[in-house]
Amino acid sequence: MLPVIALVGRPNVGKSTLFNYLTRSREALVADFPGLTRDRQYGRLKHGDRPCLIVDTGGIADDAEGIENLARKQVQIALEEADIVFFMVDAREGLSASDKVIADTLRKLAKPVVLVTNKVDGIDAGTAMNDFYSLGLGEPIACSASHGRGIPELLERANELLPPDKEAVDDNQGGIGIAVVGRPNVGKSTLVNRLLGEERVIVFDEPGTTRDSIYIPFERNGKRFTLVDTAGMRRRSKVSETIEKFSIIKSLQAIEKSHVVIYLIDASEAITDQDAHLLGLVLEAGRALIIGLNKWDGLSVDQKANIHRQLDIKLSFLEFAEKHPISALHGSGVGKLFDVVHTLYDSAMVNMSTPMLTRILKEATDAHQPPLVGNRRIKLKYAHQGGRNPPVVIIHGTQTDALPISYKRYLTNYFRTKLHLSGTPIRLEFKSPT
Ligand code: GDP
Ligand code: GDP
């Protein structure tokens, strides 16, 4: 599973500043789409080599009264959702009583903690940090979130403390990985139970994959699929079991482990900011995406028009995604969903040859040349495949660091169209000799 880092600390130490620094993408691919408010609490690490999720517990626990409550609430979130804790303190203000309260709570937690002394810019870090050894949480790491200092050291320490990186699930031994995600009550359990409950579906009880596991392999029309469950969705129908609380982290981890995400929206309601947040994170994860417009049964003509309008306005950044009306309750559109999943999987896992990619690159640059830098033109020479799920195209050239975002967008669209990709994002990476 994708490791999770929780940011913990009293107010104003710089948690959200660090969160923003760590989760901001260089390319700002997602951020500049209007209508997409950035999620302040959950994000993907954009630095270092290892993909991670980050939770700013301050943003979630900010309604807690008093430092004890705040500490308890933050630590509770870290306990439930994180593999590792970044405990932030303010090097300028020095050790405070609140820091000690949080440290006491954290010490009882059986999770690795990295002590981060923030705001060391412009002060004598050595002296400022001495105090913090007394917290008994090991050697502090000096950093400045607002200046981006100390981050490589911080991530290196995190990497030492995290369990070893396991291979990404690129193989298709378990068939096509499907994650069903969406806000509470949109119909996820209903859809999952329908997907698994159909008589044409065989659910495998393989060693290590009991029905209680989060991976549920099944077969339909001779094809293998694996449903990546987000915690107990299937068991909800049994009254005796407690209702699993909605966890964004679990959703994000299921997204990571899948090939195709079915994101459900309740089409009888509005598309919310939270939908846009979650979908922004699906895009960042690079997964092929079907937006399931659920509860299509019984919608009026006006309601249908309205949901399409909302898709255009609020989710314009997901132009590539397939939009698909269904009724999980009655089953209409669900069979078709399997066909769409197939098509998207083929796109996400496509094999692209170097000559073909290079030819497309040449066509694109012939039709529209890259700009000049100074008086030298940026050259893009050849392209080859760099990965799958999502498809990655690596383009080699000169001065590619100077390529404007607008030209990268042009190329991305050109490749997507020429490669006939459906429902999957595509990533272009540029390399020049240094
Ligand atoms: P949070 O409440 O823990 O999320 O703290 P914020 O991220 O909102 O930061 C609180 C204040 O500290 C803001 O005014 C930030 O600009 C400032 N701040 C955060 N990181 C640094 C830093 O590394 N150096 C300095 N000098 N100020 C910082
Ligand atoms: P979850 O919280 O996303 O897992 O949502 P559930 O599957 O528990 O569904 C929430 C409610 O929506 C339940 O009362 C379902 O019966 C209802 N529901 C689910 N799918 C549909 C649908 O396609 N049409 C209608 N009308 N109701 C649905």
Image (cartoon, rainbow, N blue to C red):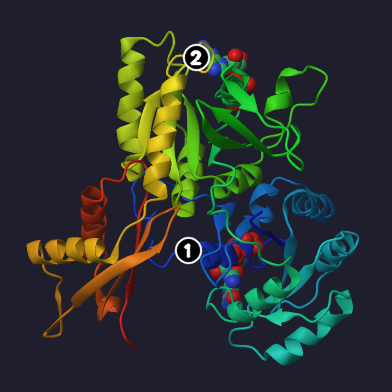
Residue at position x 36%, y 55% in the image: 351
Quick check: is the Cβ at mark 2 less than 8 Å away from ligand 2?
A: no
Residue 55, position as x, y percentages in the image: 64, 55
**Is residue 53 positioned above or below 341 on the image?**
below
- Tag 2, which secondary structure? loop
Between 62 and 253, the residue placed more toward the observer is 253
Image check: 349 left or right of 377?
A: right
**Is residue 203 positioned above or below 200 on the image?**
below
- Tag 1, which secondary structure? loop
Between 261 and 56, the residue placed more toward the observer is 261
Residue 24, labelled with which disc? 1
Q: Residues within 10 Å of mark 1 (few under 14, many from 20)?
A: some
Q: Quadrant of the C terminus?
A: bottom left
Residue 431, position as x, y percentages in the image: 33, 77
Quick check: is the Cβ at mark 1 less than 8 Å away from ligand 1?
A: no
Between 98 and 3, the residue placed more toward the observer is 3
Label 2 sits on residue:
331
Residue 81, position as x, y percentages in the image: 73, 50
Residue 223, position as x, y percentages in the image: 51, 33
Q: Is residue 181 visible?
A: no
Q: Is residue 381 visible?
A: yes
Splitting the image into 4 quarters, where does residue 49 fall? bottom right
Splitting the image into 4 quarters, where does residue 109 fall? bottom right
